[in-house]
Image (spheres, rainbow, N blue to C red):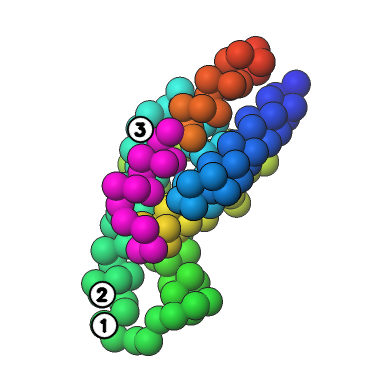
Amino acid sequence: MLSTSIATVIILGLVFSLLFTEITGVSPAGLIVPGYLTLLIRQPQAIFATFFISILTYLIVYFGVSKVTILYGKRKFTAVITVAIVLQFILHAILPDYYIEIAGLTAVGIIVPGLLANTIQRQGLTVTFLSTGLLIAMTYGSAMLLNVTI
């Protein structure tokens, strides 16, 4: 039952993200991010930590790493994901309660801050966080209407 709920929320998030991106041209930090963060809705500290790590990742990569190496395309994306993963491991070592794992989706959760940071670089912090927040709310509301357990 739990895996069905997880799949339903992820699918809802994917559908809303795809529609939102097609209609507005604004990316909510990747198609999977709103659905994944909706699954964390009952752990606001985990959502806060995800956003915090994404901002810190953006700052480190674009004002640090990019000053000492040439970053573009896949190299830039790899740098963003790598820095986000390292920051998550550091945060987990310091504050283990802030590191929330969803059974079967641990790998997805590891890349979410990197996806957010990459999108922040492309369209800005405000647009990224507002679009992602809106889609989290839409996904959560739809899941509640469908009586899906989160």
- Kind of residue at badge 1: Lys
Q: Quadrant of the C terminus?
A: top right
65 with respect to 15 (left or right):
left
Secondary structure at badge 3 equals helix
* Residue that appears at 26% across and 63% down: 59
Q: Which residue sits at x=53%, y=20%?
A: 141
Residue holding disc 1: 67
The reply to whether residue 109 is visible in this rendering is no
What's the CA distance linking mark 1 and mark 3? 32 Å
Q: Nearer the viewer, mark 3 or mark 2?
A: 2
Q: Residues within 10 Å of mark 2 (few under 14, many from 20)?
A: few
Q: Is residue 115 visible?
A: yes
> Image height check: is 125 above or below 144?
below
In the rendered structure, which amino acid carries the disc numbered 3? Gln
Q: Which mark is residue 45?
A: 3
Q: Amino acid at mark 2?
A: Gly
What's the distance in space between the residues labelled 1 and 2, CA to CA?
Answer: 5 Å
Residue 149: x and y, percent?
62, 17
**Sequence-wise first label, 3 or 2:** 3
Q: Position of residue 27 (x, y in %)?
A: 48, 51
Quarter of the picture holding the N terminus: top right
- Where is residue 134 shown, x and y percent of the image? 43, 33
Q: Is residue 42 above or below residue 122?
A: above
Residue located beneath label 2 in the image: 64
Q: Main secondary structure of the magenta part?
A: helix
Label 3: few (<14), some (14–19) or many (≥20) C-alpha neighbours in 10 Å: some
Crowdedness near tag 1: few (<14), some (14–19) or many (≥20) residues, C-alpha within 10 Å: few
Which residues are the magenta region? 121-134
Mark 1 and 2 residues: CB-CB less than 8 Å, in contact? yes
Q: CA distance from mark 3 to mark 2?
A: 27 Å
Q: Upstream in the sequence, badge 1 or badge 3?
A: 3
Q: Nearer the viewer, residue 135 or 79?
A: 135
